Image (cartoon, helix red, strand yellow):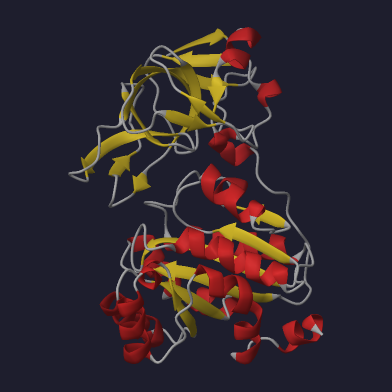
């Protein structure tokens, strides 16, 4: 292992990913190379070797930067679960690996979807470190503790059958519908990976405060413990409540069978925090199966949403099979608040709408 000083110009010239957005770059003065074991959340300076799936990098500044071979980028080590893209593990050393998410996640892609292009290949140059030679980690830059003990706002979550079932788009339009009703909304992504697209979309929809797992020191929740995921839920929910919002909207990534998602929704903690869910499904059958599982855990399902609403026939099938409202994006923008109030969750919400 070798520790050497890092020129400020080199650090500034590198493209810093969205996952590094909370880091104070003024404390980075050294780089560690050689025989070293990266940790999840550790910052690495890497060189782009071959462009693959991810051709652009979401920057900490909010801009999408095109990548070129030879670019130096600053990303974060972590694992990823993405059935439609890659499954990835955190590397054990500084060997060449992959850029596995546009938000800036470095990992080793294991299996990948058969239609997916190969991942962009990168070569780590070294771990970024402070003046004492201590590796920098995003967990060093998390939300300050809050002493908030007030009333918890009405809290709803968007969950789904799988990746690409429409959860993120639903979350944004749900936020927009609540904001259109005159409500102050806080939003957070609780599981999955940190994504600039997801965060920016929630902000654009009108959420007054948007948080995600980076804000509590995790670049990804894949391969985390149930206790850690529940801690993320608690911490982000409390910080949003401290913002004096009327409603909290949470996005839960991936599908109900994904390990961390399954553990979260089956926990007493989730049921004690979330008042109801909007379930994003790809089909009527998926909606029925998801509804049955959520009912098993005694989680109120307020409506079926997501990709299934693109088809009038599938929508009709879903309404008939579940007896629940099926809301497309336009309806979410108009009926979100009324649906929550009519479900019996919104006495306090009802008073704020008057």
Residue 243: x and y, percent? Answer: 78, 62
The residue lying toward the viewer, choosing from 188 and 150, is 188
Residue 219: x and y, percent? Answer: 49, 43
Residue 191's place in the image compared with 277, above or below, is above
Residue 87: x and y, percent? Answer: 28, 45
Residue 60's place in the image compared with 241, above or below, is above
Q: Is residue 125 visible?
A: yes
Query: Relative to 171, is 150 on the left or the right?
Result: right
Q: Residue at x 37, y 82 (%)?
A: 291
Residue 330: x and y, percent? Answer: 54, 70
Q: Residue at x 47, y 34 (%)?
A: 104
The residue lying toward the viewer, choosing from 268 and 211, is 211
Could you tell me which quadrant the C terminus lies in?
A: bottom right
Q: Quadrant of residue 126?
A: top left
The residue lying toward the viewer, choosing from 101 and 22, is 101
Q: Count of labels shown?
A: 0
Q: Is residue 344 visible?
A: no
Residue 202's place in the image compared with 181, above or below, is above
The residue lying toward the viewer, choosing from 259 and 333, is 333
Q: Quadrant of residue 118?
A: top left
Could you tell me which quadrant the N terminus lies in?
A: top left
Q: Residue at x 43, y 74 (%)?
A: 279
Q: Residue furthest front?
A: 312
Q: Quadrant of residue 353?
A: bottom right
């Amino acid at each position: 292992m070798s520790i050497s000083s890092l020129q400020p110009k080199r650090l500034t010239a590198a493209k810093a990913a969205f996952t590094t957005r909370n880091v104070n770059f003024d404390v980075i003065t050294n780089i560690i190379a050689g025989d070293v074991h990266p940790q999840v959340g550790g910052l690495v300076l890497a060189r782009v070797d071959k462009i693959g799936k991810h051709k652009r990098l979401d920057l900490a500044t909010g801009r999408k930067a095109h990548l070129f071979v030879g670019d130096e980028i600053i990303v974060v080590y972590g694992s990823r679960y993405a059935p439609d893209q890659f499954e990835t593990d955190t590397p054990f050393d500084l060997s060449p690996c992959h850029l596995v998410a546009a938000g800036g996640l470095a990992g080793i892609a294991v299996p990948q979807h058969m239609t997916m292009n190969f991942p962009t290949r990168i070569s780590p140059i070294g771990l970024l470190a402070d003046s004492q030679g201590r590796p920098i980690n995003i967990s060093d830059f998390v939300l300050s503790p809050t002493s908030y003990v007030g009333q918890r706002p009405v809290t709803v979550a968007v969950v789904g059958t799988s990746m690409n079932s429409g959860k993120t788009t639903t979350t944004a339009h749900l936020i927009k519908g609540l904001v259109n009703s005159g409500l102050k909304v806080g939003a957070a992504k609780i599981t999955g990976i940190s994504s600039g697209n997801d965060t920016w979309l929630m902000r654009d929809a009108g959420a007054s405060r948007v948080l995600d797992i980076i804000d509590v020191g995790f670049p990804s929740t894949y391969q985390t413990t149930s206790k850690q995921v529940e801690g993320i839920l608690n911490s982000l929910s409390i910080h949003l409540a401290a913002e004096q919002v009327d409603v909290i909207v949470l996005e839960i990534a991936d599908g109900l069978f994904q390990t961390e998602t399954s553990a979260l929704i089956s926990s007493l903690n989730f049921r004690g925090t979330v008042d109801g869910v909007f379930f994003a499904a790809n089909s009527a059958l998926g909606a029925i199966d998801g509804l049955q599982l959520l009912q098993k855990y005694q989680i109120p399902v307020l409506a079926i949403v997501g990709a299934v609403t693109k088809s009038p026939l599938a929508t009709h099938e879903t309404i008939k099979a579940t007896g629940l409202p099926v809301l497309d994006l336009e309806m979410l923008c108009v009926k979100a608040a009324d649906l929550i109030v009519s479900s019996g969750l919104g006495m306090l919400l009802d008073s704020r709408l008057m």
